């Protein structure tokens, strides 16, 4: 009885331990699958909060430009881009995000230098163009995705009151590696770069 | 000659209004009128007295003509007596979407409508007469700032700021352009800097034009022929975010400039001496 009892008790304990270990493993795998599934479907991703980013935050005027998005990404060309929201753009003749507006005026009456160090913004007159009076046209400003590195200079220059704030830094999710520990997030001085739920 | 700041009104942390300071004018007695929130503020700067008159509209601009105070709101005007008592009111919500300034003279009422980006002219009785600025191939004045500012000069011409083109344009009451001046320059103060300046203007009794600019904020004067004269005030006098700084002049040539960010009004007078 004692032996039988002892043998029966030993098997039961082993089975309990085995079952518990199996359960823990399944639960762990389930959690991992869920995490990977969510990550794969892109419902949680790294995002920039424009209201926190110092380059786009209203009221942050006369401050240094932050270029952490350009310098701290692990990719050779950062996954961050400046995006011009054309529906909010003033289509100005002299855009402070395109021109270095404090540079000397050239013979064409426009600033002689551009702001973007990578010449990533294209300026083009749109609509019914007045060939005699260039100030009498609307202009479209298109940012070249292959050249922009997200340095933020145009974002800061476009911000109110100098501009309308139509240019903002955004993550290109098709390029972003979605690192668990994002180096931009760690470098961001404004905690503007965080993992958030996004539309799938 | 140089310009000196006499005083800044409302320099407490709260400013002259709780939420917004939108319009400024002097009346014939050189009382300073300001509108903001939902009230008219009358300041007798020499006596130091202030009186507030509640309004039933959201005021966007103020001027005077005859014995009346004319206040614009987004779709019309209200007319008050010099004591603040109501005289008249009308609106035209079909034609007017966002009136940001007005001028009144014997030739009519001129409402700067940012929604249509044109100036709408009405008779003093409120009958629509004609538009100003509709000839522009851009469809109207180019106003990335979202506001049109204007004034009437001593010859009855309508002087309008066209900031997106870095120009000041003068029109006859019927809408025909008389002339224009201004160009972009981000270095030489004779030009207008930034994306869209000047934002606001006023005309002195002798025809001198006072303008304000944003980013960085400053105040400048031009002769009637468009020749740059001098800088009245620079960025240090205003909040860095100040934009659309409405300006008014009195009969003695004093200049009043509103800082919408701080909700204050700074007064300047010309003094003998050399500009720094």
Image: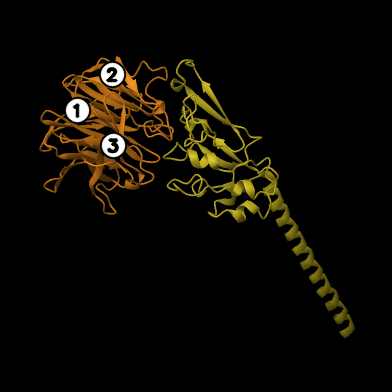
Chain colours: A yellow, B orange
Would residue A1 be visible to someone looking at this image? no
Residue B53 pos. (x, y %): 16, 42
Q: Which element type, helix, strand or loop, lies under badge 3?
A: loop
Q: Which element type, helix, strand or loop, lies under badge 2?
A: strand
Residue B65 pos. (x, y %): 15, 28
Subunit bearing disc 2: B
Q: Can you tell which mark lies on residue B206?
A: 1
Residue B10 pos. (x, y %): 24, 49
Would residue A138 be visible to someone looking at this image? yes
Q: Which element type, helix, strand or loop, lies under badge 1?
A: loop
Which is more N-terminal, label 1 or label 2? Answer: 2
Does mark 3 fall on the same chain as mark 1? yes
Give the label, 2 or 1, closer to the camera. 1
The residue pinned by badge 2 equals: B171
The residue pinned by badge 3 equals: B246
Which is more N-terminal, label 3 or label 1? Answer: 1
Q: Is residue A94 left or right of residue B82?
A: right
Does mark 2 fall on the same chain as mark 3? yes
């Amino acid at each position: 009885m004692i032996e039988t009892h002892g043998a029966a008790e030993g098997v039961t304990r082993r089975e309990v331990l085995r079952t518990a270990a199996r359960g823990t493993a399944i639960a762990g795998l389930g959690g991992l699958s869920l995490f990977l599934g969510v990550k794969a479907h892109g419902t949680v991703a790294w995002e920039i909060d424009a209201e926190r980013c110092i380059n786009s935050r209203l009221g942050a005027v006369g401050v240094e430009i932050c270029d952490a998005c350009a310098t701290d990404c692990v990719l050779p060309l950062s996954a961050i881009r400046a995006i011009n929201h054309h529906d909010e753009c003033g289509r100005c003749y002299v855009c402070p995000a395109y021109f270095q507006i404090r540079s000397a005026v050239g013979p064409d009456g426009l600033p002689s230098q551009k702001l973007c160090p990578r010449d990533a913004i294209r300026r083009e007159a749109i609509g019914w163009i007045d060939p005699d009076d260039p100030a009498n046209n609307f202009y479209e400003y298109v940012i070249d995705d292959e050249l922009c590195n997200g340095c933020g200079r145009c974002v800061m220059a476009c911000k109110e009151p100098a501009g309308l704030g139509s240019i903002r830094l955004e993550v290109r999710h098709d390029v972003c590696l979605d690192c668990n520990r994002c180096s931009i997030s760690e470098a961001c001085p404004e905690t503007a770069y965080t993992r958030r739920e996004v539309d799938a | 000659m140089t310009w000196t700041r006499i005083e800044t009104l409302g320099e407490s942390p709260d400013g002259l209004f709780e939420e917004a300071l939108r319009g400024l004018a002097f009346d014939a007695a050189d009382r300073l009128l300001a509108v903001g929130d939902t009230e008219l503020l009358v300041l007798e700067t020499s006596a130091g007295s202030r009186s507030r008159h509640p309004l039933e509209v959201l005021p966007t601009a103020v001027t005077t003509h005859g014995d009346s105070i004319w206040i614009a709101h987004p779709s019309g005007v209200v007319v008050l007596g010099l004591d603040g008592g109501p005289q008249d009111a009308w609106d035209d919500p079909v034609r007017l979407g966002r009136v940001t300034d007005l001028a009144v003279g014997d030739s009519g009422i001129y409402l700067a409508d940012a929604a249509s980006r044109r100036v709408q002219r009405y008779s003093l009785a409120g009958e629509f007469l004609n538009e100003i600025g509709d000839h522009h191939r851009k469809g109207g004045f180019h106003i990335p700032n979202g506001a049109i500012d204007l004034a009437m000069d001593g010859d009855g011409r309508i002087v309008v700021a066209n900031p997106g083109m870095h120009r000041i344009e003068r029109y006859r009451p019927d809408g025909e352009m008389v002339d224009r001046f201004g160009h972009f320059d981000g270095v030489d103060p004779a030009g207008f800097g930034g994306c869209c300046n000047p934002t606001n203007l006023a005309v002195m009794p002798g025809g001198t034009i006072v303008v304000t600019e944003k980013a960085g904020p400053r105040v400048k004067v031009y002769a009637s022929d468009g020749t740059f004269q001098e800088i009245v005030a620079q960025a240090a006098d205003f909040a860095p975010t100040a934009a659309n700084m409405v300006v008014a002049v009195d009969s003695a040539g004093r200049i009043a400039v509103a800082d919408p960010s701080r909700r204050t009004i700074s007064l300047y007078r010309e003094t003998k001496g050399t500009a720094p």
